[in-house]
Amino acid sequence: MSTSPEPYEIYAVKYAYRDAVRAQNFIFSDAHDVPMPLDYYVWAIVGKSKTYVVDTGFDEAEAAARKRDHIRSPAEGLRLIGVEAENVEEIILTHMHYDHCGNMKQFPKAKFYLQDREMAFATGRFMREKFIRHSFAVDYVTDLVRALYDDRVDFVDGVREIAPGLSLHHVGGHTDGLQVVRVWTRRGWMVIASDATHFYDNMNRTNPFPIVFNMGHVMEGYRTVQALADSPQHVIAGHDPLVMARFPAVSKETEGIAVRLDADPLHWE
Ligand SMILES: [Zn+2]
């Protein structure tokens, strides 16, 4: 008889946002100049014995440099759902763009799961191209190289189950080494897609967000995410404000800050 793994709880914590219009968020023309802001999130996967954090966000200095609206540090947001950054031991980095891998000093005990190809990408020949390296922050990349030399990086080559009910899957596309996270929850298999689909509409319309390293892999990534999740309602987009609208707040205090993703969606229009 097969036994199911213990289900995990999953949370999204919003720490920043950016105003944008619809046309900025799709590579193939989408002529509507209506507002379509981006949210910036980190995620927490909470199990009976261990908590995993997915991505670590950017800090205030980086927000100021890039004119993003920084609301709170990811560590502050995580504290509001009972996760203390200084105690976190395992962090999954979906990729090394500036909005996903900063703030490392706030997680002194953590080791980091990263795809081989992402570290190679962020430190290799394509960083000679200014439009490709623009989405990376050299200080954050350097922090991760230091973490590697401190035995704090654990590499993934493609697919790896890191615990029962929790696995990492390379998709690439947006960056060469982007990975998504598949999680067993009380409502089935969910996928934290991160930037495999910034907005739900990128995947639904097969119309990628304009930061693309390999277009074919972006589109294959949509198929991979859909195959790994039990339904479209089990996919968590990386930057979509709909995540905050579709899922219930963790508590009254965290309205607009943190939502529970393994709860049934409130609505799905
Ligand atoms: Zn991102």
Image: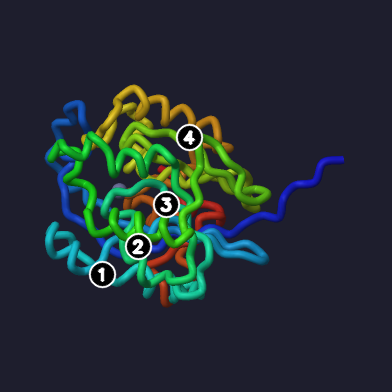
- Give the SS element for disc 1: loop
The answer to whether the residue labelled 3 contacts the one labelled 2, judged by CB atoms less than 8 Å apart, is no
Q: CA distance from mark 4 to mark 1?
A: 29 Å
- Give the SS element for disc 2: strand
The answer to whether the residue labelled 4 contacts the one labelled 1, judged by CB atoms less than 8 Å apart, is no
Left or right: 160 with respect to 22?
Answer: right
User: How many C-alpha atoms fall within 10 Å of the one at disc 2: few (<14), some, or many (≥20)?
Assistant: many
Select label 1 or label 3 by which is in front.
Answer: 3
Of 267 and 23, the residue lying toward us:
23
- Give the SS element for disc 3: loop
The answer to whether one can see residue 234 in this image is no
Which residue is denoted by mark 3 in the rendering?
A: 93
Which residue is denoted by mark 2 in the rendering?
A: 14
Select label 3 or label 2 by which is in front.
Answer: 3
Residue kind at label 4, given as amino acid type: Val
Of 67 and 264, the residue lying toward us:
67
Q: CA distance from mark 1 to mark 2?
A: 8 Å
Disc 1 residue lies near ligand 1 with CB under 8 A:
no
The answer to whether the residue labelled 4 contacts the one labelled 3, judged by CB atoms less than 8 Å apart, is no
Residue 201: x and y in percent read: 33, 36
Which residue is denoted by mark 1 in the rendering?
A: 71
Residue kind at label 3, given as amino acid type: Leu
Pick whichever of labels 1 and 2 is earlier in the sequence. 2
Q: Quadrant of the C terminus?
A: top left
**In the rendered view, would you say 91 is above or below 71?**
above
Residue kind at label 1, given as amino acid type: Ile
